[in-house]
């Protein structure tokens, strides 16, 4: 039986057109720093892709700095000393949402005493009142604040009110970054509307290969301390010979992802069917964030007494790829930090399963998912060992 892949928030397959652009660029060769014709052709590939990635952020004129990943883009910008022309000076303090990806929570370059984590509400939204009060305190203390809040969460799919947050941040002369890695290609992303100064993208979440990402800057950049020093590539913002095949693929994927946004309502309809089917089979299921604005492709659910790791393995053996919300750290399964921040109890958080649809997901995939889930529920009931015994034999 064909596999059903419902883990597109982890990564999604490369577009064939992006793969073609990638191999054409690789076969063509050329170093974009060379002044001969081959070098100029390579430069052209980069600049064309730069325009397409900028358009994915809403405007061809935005400043795109190519990086090796979404993680690197976050690490690059979340740094003391970063400064744009419109803010009050170089950043001295970071406020990062506790719902954010580790690429921001861990991947920043501020010292621990200059960082606060913005708390979340049980709805999965960040606590705006807390943020507003803290911004005012920091302004009074003379700090220049950089705020980082992800646009859409990779686990719950919940979308944050970035426009409102940007306004609060700019009112105190601070700077605003959003991690748009999961939002890109799933909802429209427009830096101007969002009001953000910085935004991060990752290629492999939108149909380019892994190993390519971008930091997009709106407005004039005054300072951006190096993360990777060396040659003068990317206008001295990111040293190292450019990954031209990856960049070529990223440009094509950005165009395709933007064009594909028109199918978002079809994906949302499939996701809603999936959730309806799930609730019919398991009326006691919790769907995290279902009352908040969410990405159209993501369902994050849990049923008590159905441990996530066991369920993921059972799905896998039945040919369906989904993921659990827990992470394995040092050999111990830890509850999702996102659900912990949303005050979900540890036992329920340990049962969280993420289902994320992609551009090729079909009704058959949803039917198969529900068929397998019905089977798992009937077999397991309140006895999770039922699956474990069956799958390990
Ligand atoms: N930010 C978010 C919200 C993500 O979901 C991910 C990947 O899962 C990243 C950042 C990291 O991106 P990359 O895999 O390109 O380093």
Image (cartoon, grey):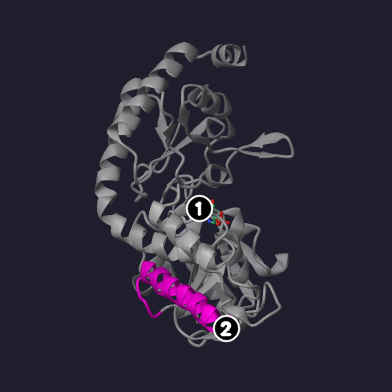
User: Is residue 148 something that shows in the picture?
Assistant: no
Q: With respect to residue 175, does 342 lie above or below?
A: above
Q: x and y percent of residue 276 in the render?
A: 29, 30
Residue situated in front as seen by the camera: 313 or 134: 313
- Is disc 1 in contact with disc 2, using a CB cutoff of under 8 Å? no
Q: Taking 138 as reference, is 12 left or right?
A: left
Magenta part, dominant SS: helix
Q: With respect to residue 135, does 291 lie above or below?
A: above
Q: x and y percent of residue 160 in the render?
A: 41, 58
Quarter residue 193 falls in: bottom left
Q: Which residues are magenta?
A: 33-61
Q: x and y percent of residue 250 in the render?
A: 46, 62
Rate crowding at label 1 as few (under 14), some (14 to 19) or many (20 or more) other CA atoms within 10 Å: many
Residue topped by disc 1: 120
Q: With respect to residue 226, does 85 lie above or below?
A: below
Q: Taking 30 as reference, is 355 left or right?
A: left
Q: Earlier in the sequence, mark 1 or mark 2?
A: 1
Rate crowding at label 2 as few (under 14), some (14 to 19) or many (20 or more) other CA atoms within 10 Å: few
Inspect the magenta stretch and tell me whether residue 131 lies in it: no
Q: Secondary structure at mark 1?
A: loop
- Residue at 38% of width from left, 27% of height from top? 369
Q: x and y percent of residue 117 in the render?
A: 59, 60
- Residue 74 shows which numbered tag? none
User: Is residue 386 something that shows in the picture?
Assistant: yes
Q: Secondary structure at mark 2?
A: helix
Q: Where does ligand 1 appear, by image quarter?
A: bottom right
Residue topped by disc 2: 235
Quarter residue 383 falls in: top right
Which-is-in-front pick, marks 1 and 2?
A: 2
């Amino acid at each position: 039986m064909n596999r059903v892949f419902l883990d597109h928030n982890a990564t999604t397959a490369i577009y064939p057109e992006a793969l073609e652009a990638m191999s054409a660029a690789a076969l063509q060769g050329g170093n974009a720093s060379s002044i001969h014709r081959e070098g100029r052709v390579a430069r052209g590939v980069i600049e064309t892709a730069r325009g397409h990635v900028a358009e994915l952020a809403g405007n061809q004129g935005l400043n795109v700095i190519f990086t090796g990943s979404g993680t690197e883009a976050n690490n690059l910008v979340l740094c003391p000393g970063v400064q744009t022309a419109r803010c009050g000076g170089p950043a001295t303090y970071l406020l990062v949402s506790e719902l954010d990806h580790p690429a921001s929570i861990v991947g920043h370059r501020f010292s621990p005493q200059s960082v606060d984590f913005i708390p979340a509400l049980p709805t999965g939204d960040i606590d705006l009142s807390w943020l507003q009060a803290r911004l005012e305190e920091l302004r009074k203390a003379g700090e220049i604040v950089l705020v980082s809040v992800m646009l859409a969460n990779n686990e719950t799919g919940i979308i944050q009110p970035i426009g409102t947050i940007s306004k609060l941040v700019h009112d105190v002369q601070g700077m605003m970054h959003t991690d748009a890695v999961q939002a890109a290609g799933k909802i429209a992303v427009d830096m101007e509307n969002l009001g953000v100064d910085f935004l991060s993208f990752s290629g492999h979440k939108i149909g380019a290969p892994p190993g390519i990402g971008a930091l997009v800057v709106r407005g004039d950049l005054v300072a951006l301390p190096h993360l990777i020093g060396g040659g003068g590539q990317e206008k001295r913002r990111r040293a190292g010979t450019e990954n031209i095949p990856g960049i070529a693929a990223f440009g094509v994927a950005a165009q395709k992802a933007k064009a594909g946004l028109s199918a978002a309502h079809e994906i949302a309809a499939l996701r809603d069917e999936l959730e309806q089917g799930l609730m019919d089979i398991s009326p006691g299921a919790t769907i995290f964030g279902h009352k908040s604005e969410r990405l159209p492709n993501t369902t994050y659910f849990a049923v008590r007494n159905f441990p996530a790791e066991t369920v993921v393995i059972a799905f896998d053996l039945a040919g369906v790829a989904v993921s659990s919300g827990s992470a394995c750290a040092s050999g111990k399964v830890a509850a999702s930090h996102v659900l912990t921040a949303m005050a979900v109890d540890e036992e329920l958080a340990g049962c969280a399963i993420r289902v994320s649809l992609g551009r090729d997901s079909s009704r058959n995939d949803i039917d198969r998912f529900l068929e397998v889930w019905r089977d798992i529920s009937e077999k397991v009931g309140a006895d999770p060992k039922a699956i474990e015994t069956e799958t390990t034999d």
